[in-house]
Image (spheres, rainbow, N blue to C red):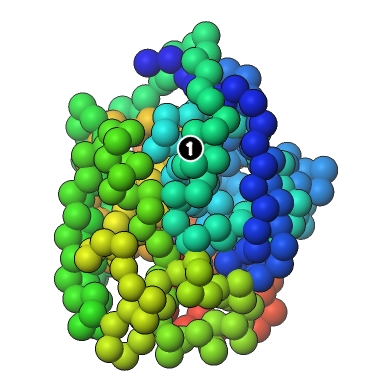
């Protein structure tokens, strides 16, 4: 299949989910083999595992002190619609939260039109199965002739419980079944998160907020939570820059494990462009940088 970009630049403004700051993003066409590239403060930051500087609660890319938070929903929309090459100029520390899902990014890219390009895609074939994580949180991927995700989410909250989703990718199923699923968080955690610089732009407009008795602002799907988890996984694996031929099987994974899987896939292929730090090292460095921030166990905002 041929690589694709968009036909014309498109703009989205809003506030950042975690920073709460006003942000603006211009997505423009990019040449063959460019991949998805972010630009901010004069820095060029390729969407790649090497650029990930934080993977707690959201996926943050960075270079030389410039950081762009919460790239995963745009990344998911891009690959879900089959775009390989995009240039994303960002003003602000984060992408717009939009409605907490990938739906507004899908709508934005659809207005930009689709341009087939003069080079073929090069899918990644795995040499062997890979597994990351342990206990009740893990992801494995087994070689397959096509990409597929099977996800199990277990949550102690009775309103969520156990949700299972097996997703067979197509543009239609992405647009209708995954893209509109919103991020979620628990009402009881919001105070702590805000104190720690998270969810400051979060509201009932851009997240499912789960109270004691269930979601206080209604659901788009009965199993919206697991759908959002699969959406995040699609967005994070898009950091590999090429379609992945494998069946991804995940249990209670979040951005940290999604990133660890992307790094493990690169290692298995000998594809690291430079030394890729382990996910644990990235998390430790990010914790140190965040100046005393302590991850709160049990948070599920993703
Ligand atoms: Zn998400």
Q: Residue at x 54, y 33 (%)?
A: 111
| On-image quarter of the N terminus | top left
| On-image quarter of the C terminus | bottom left
Q: Residue furthest top?
A: 118
Left or right, residue 298 beside residue 249: right
Left or right, residue 16 beside residue 222: right
Q: Residue furthest right?
A: 42
Q: Which residue is mark 1?
A: 78
Q: Quadrant of residue 98?
A: bottom right
Q: Residue at x 36, y 86 (%)?
A: 211
Q: Relative to the observer, which residue lies in front, 259 or 134?
A: 259
* Helix, strand or loop at mark 1: helix
Question: Up-down: is 154 above or below 112?
Answer: below
Q: Total marks drawn?
A: 1
Percent position of residue 42, x then y:
82, 43
Q: Can residue 221 be seen by looking at this rendering?
A: yes
Q: Quadrant of residue 155?
A: bottom left
Percent position of residue 32, x then y:
58, 18
Mark 1, ligand 1, within 8 Å: the answer is no
């Amino acid at each position: 299949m041929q690589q694709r970009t968009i036909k014309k630049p498109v703009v989205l403004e809003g506030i950042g989910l975690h920073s709460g700051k006003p942000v603006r993003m211009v997505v423009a066409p990019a040449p063959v083999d460019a991949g998805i590239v972010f630009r901010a403060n004069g820095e060029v930051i390729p969407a790649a595992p090497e650029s990930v500087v934080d993977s707690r609660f959201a996926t943050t890319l960075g270079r030389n002190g410039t950081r762009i938070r919460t790239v995963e929903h745009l990344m998911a929309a891009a690959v879900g619609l089959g775009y390989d090459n995009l240039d994303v100029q960002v003003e602000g520390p984060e992408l717009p939260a939009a409605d907490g899902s990938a739906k507004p990014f899908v709508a934005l890219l659809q207005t930009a039109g689709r341009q087939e390009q003069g080079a073929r895609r090069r899918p990644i074939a795995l040499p062997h199965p890979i597994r990351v994580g342990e206990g009740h949180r893990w992801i494995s991927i087994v070689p397959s002739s096509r990409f597929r995700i099977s996800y199990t989410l277990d949550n102690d909250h009775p309103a969520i419980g156990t949700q299972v989703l097996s997703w067979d990718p197509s543009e239609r199923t992405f647009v209708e079944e995954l893209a509109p699923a919103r991020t979620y968080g628990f009402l009881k955690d919001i105070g702590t998160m805000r104190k720690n610089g998270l969810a400051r732009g979060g509201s009932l407009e851009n997240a499912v907020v789960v109270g004691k008795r269930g979601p206080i602002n209604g659901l788009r799907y009965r199993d919206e939570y697991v759908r959002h988890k699969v959406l995040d996984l699609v967005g994070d694996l898009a950091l590999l820059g090429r379609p992945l031929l494998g069946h991804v099987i995940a249990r209670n994974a979040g951005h940290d494990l999604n990133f660890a899987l992307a790094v493990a896939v690169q290692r298995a292929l000998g594809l690291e462009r430079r030394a890729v730090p382990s996910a644990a090292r990235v998390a430790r460095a990010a914790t140190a940088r965040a100046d005393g921030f302590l991850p709160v166990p049990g948070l599920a905002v993703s």
